[in-house]
Image (cartoon, helix red, strand yellow):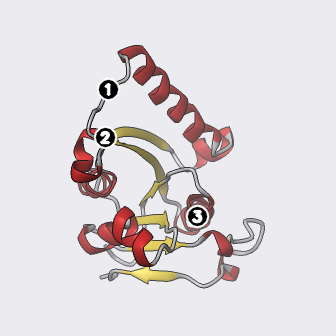
Amino acid sequence: MAGRFTHILVPTDFNPASDAALAYAKELALMFDARLTLLHVVTDPVATGAWAPDVYVSASAEMGARFLRTTRERLEAALTPEERARFAVRIEVWIGVPAQIIEDIAREQKVDLIVMGTHGRRGLSHMFLGSVAERVVRHAPCPVLTTHAEILPDVKSEPAALPRWEWTGSVL
C-alpha cells in the first residue's frame, strides 16, 4: 500500500461509537476516493462458549431471514443513495464471531483500512464482554482506526479539520 486507502471496512453494531466510525470513514473515503464496505456481524450464540445460556433455542428460519433483511436495510439507511453510489458501498451481514468475521472480510476483500468504534469498556465489563476492537487491532491484516462516540467529526468541515485520530497498526 503506497500510503493510500482504496477500500475501507466499517464494522458496526449500531451504537454511537459505530456512528462516529462511519462519519470518519466517509471523510477518509472522500479524501482518498475509496470505496466502503459496511459490515454487521450477528453474534452466534452457539459460539459464545461458556458464557452462553445452558439452553439455546434457535430462531425459526423465517425469523432469522427477517432479522438479516432488517439489518441489511438498517445498514443501507446509514448512507444516502448518493453516498452509496459515490463510495461504491458494499453491505455485508454475517452470523458468527464478530472479531473473526471482521478479520476474514478484511483479508478476503483486501481491505486497506478498518474504521471501527470502541465502547471504551474497562474493568470487569471489559473482562467479561471483551473487546471486539481490541481483538481486531491485534489480528487485522491492515491498519485499524478506532473512534469513540464523544468525538464525532463535523462532516461538513474540511477533511483536515478531523478531530484526534487514534491509529493502531502501521501504514507501510
Measured as percent of width and height from the top left, residue 101 is found at: 29, 50
How many discs appear? 3
Tell me the element at label 2: helix
Label 3 Cα crowd, 10 Å radius (few <14 / some 14-19 / many 20+)? many
Q: Is residue 84 left or right of residue 64?
A: right
Residue 4, can we see it? no
Mark 1 vs mark 2: in front: 1
- Give the residue furthest to the right: 156
Residue labelled with disc 2 = 45
Residue type at numbered disc 3: Ala
Q: Secondary structure at mark 1?
A: loop
Q: Earlier in the sequence, mark 1 or mark 2?
A: 2
Identify the residue at image location x=78%, y=66%: 156
- In this view, the residue in front, 101 or 7, is 101
Q: Residue at x 29, y 45 (%)?
A: 52
Q: Quick one: SS at disc 3? A: helix
Q: Is residue 171 left or right of residue 160?
A: left
Q: Position of residue 18 (x, y in %)?
A: 56, 59
- Residues at marks 2 and 3, CA–CA distance in whole angstroms: 23 Å
Image quadrant assignment for residue 152: bottom right
What is the number of the mark on residue 17? Answer: 3
- Give the labeled residue for mark 1: 57
Alpha carbon separation for disc pair 1 and 3 = 31 Å
Closer to us: mark 1 or mark 3? Answer: 1
In front here: 128 or 137? 128
